[in-house]
Image (cartoon, grey):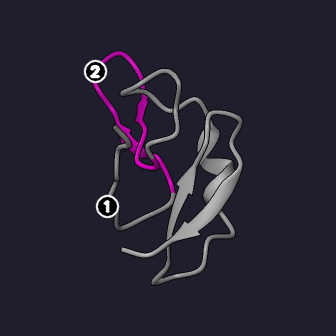
Amino acid sequence: MARRVIRETKEPYVMTPKEGSVRLCMCGLSKNQPFCDKSCRAVKDEEEGKVYEYDAEGSRKEIQP
């Protein structure tokens, strides 16, 4: 079952707890969920209004919503 992430931003969500920053994955591609592993770099050039699917190797294809 594929996951679909709906997000407002392509950047990870940054939380600042008392002992340091934590980055939460907002792109849905991190292999270290719920934390960001910088997989979001792959989504930087996505076009607005389009929906993409990524395979295990990180290859992207556009899908119809």
Q: What residue appears at the point 36 percent right and 27 percent down from the top-left corner?
A: 34
Magenta span: 11-27
* Residue 33 is covered by the magenta coloring: no
Q: What residue appears at the point 50 percent right and 55 percent down from the top-left corner?
A: 11
Residue 44: image location, x then y, percent: 65, 63
Q: Main secondary structure of the magenta part?
A: loop
Residue designated by label 1: 6
Q: Is residue 48 left or right of residue 3?
A: right
Q: What residue appears at the point 43 percent right and 43 percent down from the top-left corner?
A: 28
Q: Is residue 29 left or right of residue 60?
A: left
Residue designated by label 2: 18
Residue 1: image location, x then y, percent: 34, 37
Q: Residues within 10 Å of mark 1 (few under 14, many from 20)?
A: few
Q: Is residue 22 above or below residue 3?
A: above
**Residue 33: which quarter of the image?**
top left
Q: Is residue 41 above or below residue 61?
A: above
Query: On the rendered image, what quadrant is the C terminus found in?
Result: bottom left
Residue 17: image location, x then y, percent: 28, 25
Q: What residue appears at the point 61 percent right and 42 percent down from the top-left corner?
A: 55
Give me the C-alpha separation between circle 1 and circle 2: 28 Å
Q: Which mark is residue 29?
A: none
Residue 46: image location, x then y, percent: 62, 71
Q: Is residue 6 left or right of residue 30?
A: left
**Residue 60: which quarter of the image?**
bottom right
